[in-house]
Image: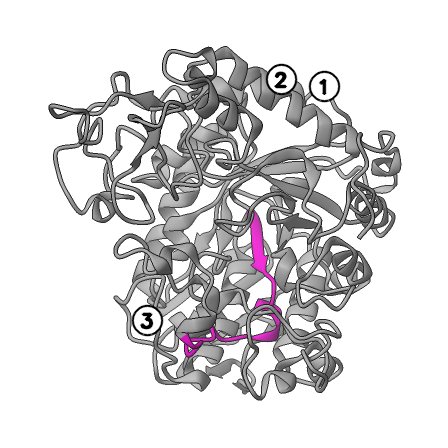
């Protein structure tokens, strides 16, 4: 591997080759690439930036507008790169800064935008600041950049408060001081290798404003902000007063999440972003109790988009879907932000598997379920999502209808939460298995040297090669849906739908001359023929004025 350059390449002007379509992000379809599992260019079994670059034409032809890259920064990889040791360097397993520069330039030349992950809530314990804080000891200025506290108890043997880590266990770890004695504790809402920054310290804000400019000068088109609801903690770090705190997440405002102080940070960041041409954007990963609180992150002077996790967690049920769609559009309308819609990502079980199982099992499950049912519902859910007003996110492999790999042997698992006794379920590896490109080969076209997580037998029949040009394949459905979405003036941006009367279990709405109907029931339903069929996720039967829509099927019509 070539040595890491000491500085960024010259700022790219390639952004000018990307379409300057105004407010492109309001209706963008953004494709999430998990770099280690997308494409491997050097045969080491790990995906890399050069692998992503070589596959950019595939993403262009798929019809997406932008590519979001999960972290590729220099990292010890204690949490798959979300523990950053150097925010201005590429980890050697993924390549170099020159590879990142080439990827950005090639993407722009193909009309694709690049969004990168930013991890501001915490660093790696190998980050220079944290190593210095440990070495300098209690009372040092370096420790003020993190949350170091003396412990409770007679000899400081108890954590400073009762907060629990998202990955299980206490959110505090005690350090051994330079003189060898047990010392202070530091806060980590995730793994012990991920100490939380103290955003009350001005140096932290200064550093991240500099990091933003570094990557903006490289030409990136935006940032997905990891744990955007974190960063600011309640004054005094008060006890929560309960155990099993994970069960409270998403239901209450916590003293360490969704504090109002985060919004001042984002207003500062927005001013930086607005200095740059090309309509760069921020996307918030903000787990909040309600979609109304999520809307606080996308006020006009803050971020541009926020992931709609309430929608991701909604069951395949017409009533639930309509409720969350209405609440989302109603919440975003007053702040003038687009709604976003997402069905899968690198942290949850793929929706083709979630929908294959009974409702109520959550977003991380270990059951294969009814594969045919799951795929049928996943295809229908995709057409429904792409018909809604706003922006949509597609996780790599969704377009192939990939299921979660639920039977990985325990000895190959790498999710850090799996190795802790409590916390998240720890089965995120199932959605991170490298995707198949070809029918055959040691890793189905992922690379020449196998894959870092084992791919299941039969993966090749779901590959890009197997599905390309195959009528009715999930890949061709996505390609056609994205082409129709881009060419139809009634689709894309907007803030409302007109609900149509429909039988129980059916979602039906109009947008101009466009009509979308999703049958979420297990039986066929007879519906009016709303016009000319544009696309359907399954086989429908039509007469002159009626259409029979099969179970778990979505249909697009147009009156134009």
Mark 2 is surrounded, within 10 Å at the Cα level, by few (under 14), some (14 to 19) or many (20 or more) other residues, namely: few
- Left or right: residue 446 versus residue 491 is right
Question: Going 35% across and 30% down the picture, which residue do you hit?
Answer: 176
Q: Earlier in the sequence, mark 2 or mark 3?
A: 2
User: What is the C-alpha distance between the residues marked 2 and 1?
Assistant: 7 Å
Picture coordinates of residue 353, whole percent (x, y): 42, 74
- Left or right: residue 81 versus residue 141 is right
User: What is the C-alpha distance between the residues marked 2 and 3?
Assistant: 46 Å
Extent of the magenta region? 390-409
Quarter of the rendering occupied by the C terminus: bottom right
Mark 3 lies on a secondary structure that is loop
Q: Which residue is mark 1?
A: 275
Mark 1 lies on a secondary structure that is loop
Tag 2–tag 1 contact (CB < 8 Å):
yes
Taking the magenta stretch, the answer to whether it contains residue 259 is no
Disc number for residue 505: 3
Taking the magenta stretch, the answer to whether it contains residue 402 is yes
Question: Going 78% across and 33% down the picture, which residue do you hit?
Answer: 218
Mark 2 lies on a secondary structure that is helix
- Left or right: residue 88 versus residue 7 is left
Question: Going 71% across and 44% down the picture, which residue do you hit?
Answer: 114
476 and 236: which is toward the camera: 236
Tag 1–tag 3 contact (CB < 8 Å):
no
Measured along the vertical axis of the image, is residue 247 above or below residue 366? Answer: above
Disc number for residue 406: none
Q: Which residue is mark 2?
A: 271
């Amino acid at each position: 591997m070539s040595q890491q350059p000491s500085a960024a390449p010259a700022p790219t002007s390639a952004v000018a080759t990307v379409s300057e379509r105004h407010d492109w992000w309001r209706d963008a379809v953004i494709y999430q690439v998990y770099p280690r599992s997308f494409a491997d260019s050097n045969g080491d079994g790990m995906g890399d930036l050069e692998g992503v670059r070589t596959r950019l034409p595939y993403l262009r032809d798929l019809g997406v507008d932008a590519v979001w890259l999960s972290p590729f920064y220099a990292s010890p990889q204690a949490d798959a790169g979300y523990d950053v040791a150097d925010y201005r360097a590429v980890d050697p397993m993924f390549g170099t800064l020159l590879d990142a520069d080439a990827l950005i330039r090639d993407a722009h030349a193909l009309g694709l935008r690049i969004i990168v992950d930013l991890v501001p809530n915490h660093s790696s314990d190998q980050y220079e600041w944290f190593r210095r804080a440990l070495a300098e000891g209690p009372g040092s200025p370096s420790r003020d950049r993190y949350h170091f506290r003396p412990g409770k108890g007679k000899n400081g043997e108890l954590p400073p408060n009762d907060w629990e880590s998202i990955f299980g266990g206490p959110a505090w770890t005690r350090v051994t001081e330079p003189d060898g004695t047990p010392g202070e504790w530091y806060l980590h809402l995730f793994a012990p290798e991920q100490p939380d920054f103290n955003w009350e310290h001005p140096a932290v804000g200064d550093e991240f404003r500099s990091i933003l400019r570094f990557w903006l000068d490289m030409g990136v088109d935006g940032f997905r902000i990891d744990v955007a609801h974190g960063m600011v903690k309640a004054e005094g770090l008060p006890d929560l007063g309960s155990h099993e705190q994970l069960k409270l997440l998403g239901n209450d405002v916590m003293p360490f999440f969704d504090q109002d102080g985060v919004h001042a940070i984002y207003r500062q960041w927005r001013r930086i972003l607005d200095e740059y041409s090309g309509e760069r954007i921020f996307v918030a990963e903000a787990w909040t109790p309600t979609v109304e609180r999520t809307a606080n992150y996308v006020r006009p002077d803050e971020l541009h988009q926020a992931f709609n996790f309430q929608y991701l967690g909604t069951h395949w049920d017409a009533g639930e879907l309509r409720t969350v769609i209405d609440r989302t559009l109603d919440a975003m309308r007053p702040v003038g932000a687009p709604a976003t819609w997402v069905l899968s990502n690198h942290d949850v079980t793929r929706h083709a598997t979630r929908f294959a199982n009974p409702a109520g099992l959550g977003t991380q499950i270990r059951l294969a379920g009814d594969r045919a049912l799951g795929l049928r519902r996943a295809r229908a859910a995709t057409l429904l999502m792409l018909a809604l007003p706003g922006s949509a996110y597609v996780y790599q492999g969704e377009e192939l209808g990939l299921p979660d790999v639920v039977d990985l042997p325990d000895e190959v698992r790498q999710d850090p939460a799996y190795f802790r006794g409590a916390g998240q379920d720890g089965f995120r590896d199932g959605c991170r298995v490298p995707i198949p490109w070809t029918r055959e080969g040691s890793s189905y076209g992922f690379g020449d040297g196998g894959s870092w997580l084992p791919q299941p037998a039969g993966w090749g029949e779901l590959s890009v090669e197997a599905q390309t040009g195959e009528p009715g394949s999930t890949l061709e459905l996505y390609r056609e849906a994205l082409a129709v979405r881009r060419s139809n003036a009634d689709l894309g941006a907007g803030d409302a739908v007109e609900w149509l009367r429909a039988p129980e279990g059916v979602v039906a709405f109009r947008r101009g001359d466009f009509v979308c109907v999703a049958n979420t029931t297990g039986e066929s339903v007879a519906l009016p023929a709303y016009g000319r069929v544009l696309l359907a996720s399954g086989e429908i039967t039509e007469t002159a004025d009626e259409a029979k829509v099969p179970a778990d099927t979505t249909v697009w019509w147009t009156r134009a």
